[in-house]
Image: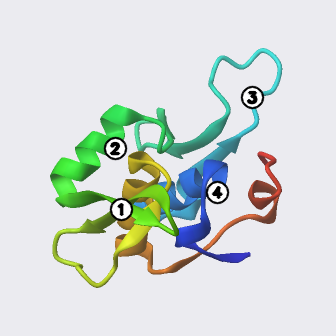
Amino acid sequence: MLKEVKDLTGYPLDYALALALCHRPMNLLIHPKPNGDVRMPGVWIGNPDGMHSRITYDNVVMMYGLIVRERIHLCPVKLDGVDAWQSWVDHTKGQRVYGPEPKIAVARAFTTYRMGREVEIPSALLQGRLL
């Protein structure tokens, strides 16, 4: 289902962020953590060496790396009287996005920069389920 990046959180935002990072949906593994599996549930990117990396906007180190590498800006703002964060990639000042916390704003800014304002998200993720 086509969704606006500005509205994404949780696994759907993780999925969109993974797409923005690798541009190859066939390399993505949406992992529900079956019994006995040691991996955490979530969205994973398959690497050429057979290893997988978990992608989540909750990974502070990964998000900090994106901020530095992509020159992503953050600015605290008020939206309808509520504290929020505005974010944009340095050379795309017209693509400002917002989030309730910095990591969500950064993930949305990077995803919008790479994928555009809308991205295709599997329906199961939108319903809060892993595939």
Q: Do the residues labelled 2 and 3 touch (CB within 8 Å)?
A: no
Which of the two discs, 1 and 3, sits closer to the camera?
Answer: 1
Lower sequence index among marks 4 and 3? 4
Residue wearing tag 2: 63
Inter-mark Cα distance, 2 to 3 = 24 Å
Counting from the top left corner in percent of width and height, residue 83 is at 45, 54
Counting from the top left corner in percent of width and height, residue 73 is at 22, 60
Inter-mark Cα distance, 4 to 3 = 17 Å
Please tell me how crowded label 3 is: few (under 14), some (14-19), or many (20+) other residues with Cα within 10 Å: few
Residue wearing tag 3: 33
Inter-mark Cα distance, 1 to 3 = 37 Å
Counting from the top left corner in percent of width and height, residue 20 is at 43, 63
Q: What residue type is labelled 3?
A: Lys
The residue depicted at 83 percent of the width and 19 percent of the height is 35
Please tell me how crowded label 4 is: few (under 14), some (14-19), or many (20+) other residues with Cα within 10 Å: many
Counting from the top left corner in percent of width and height, residue 8 is at 60, 62
Q: Is residue 80 above or below residue 60?
A: below
Q: What residue type is labelled 1?
A: Val
Camera-side residue: 97 or 113?
A: 97
Q: Are marks 4 and 3 in contact (CB under 8 Å)?
A: no
Residue wearing tag 1: 77
Which of the two discs, 1 and 2, sits closer to the camera?
Answer: 1
Inter-mark Cα distance, 1 to 4 = 24 Å
How many numbered marks, from 0 up? 4
Residue wearing tag 4: 12
Lower sequence index among marks 4 and 2? 4
Which of the two discs, 2 and 3, sits closer to the camera?
Answer: 2
Inter-mark Cα distance, 1 to 2 = 20 Å
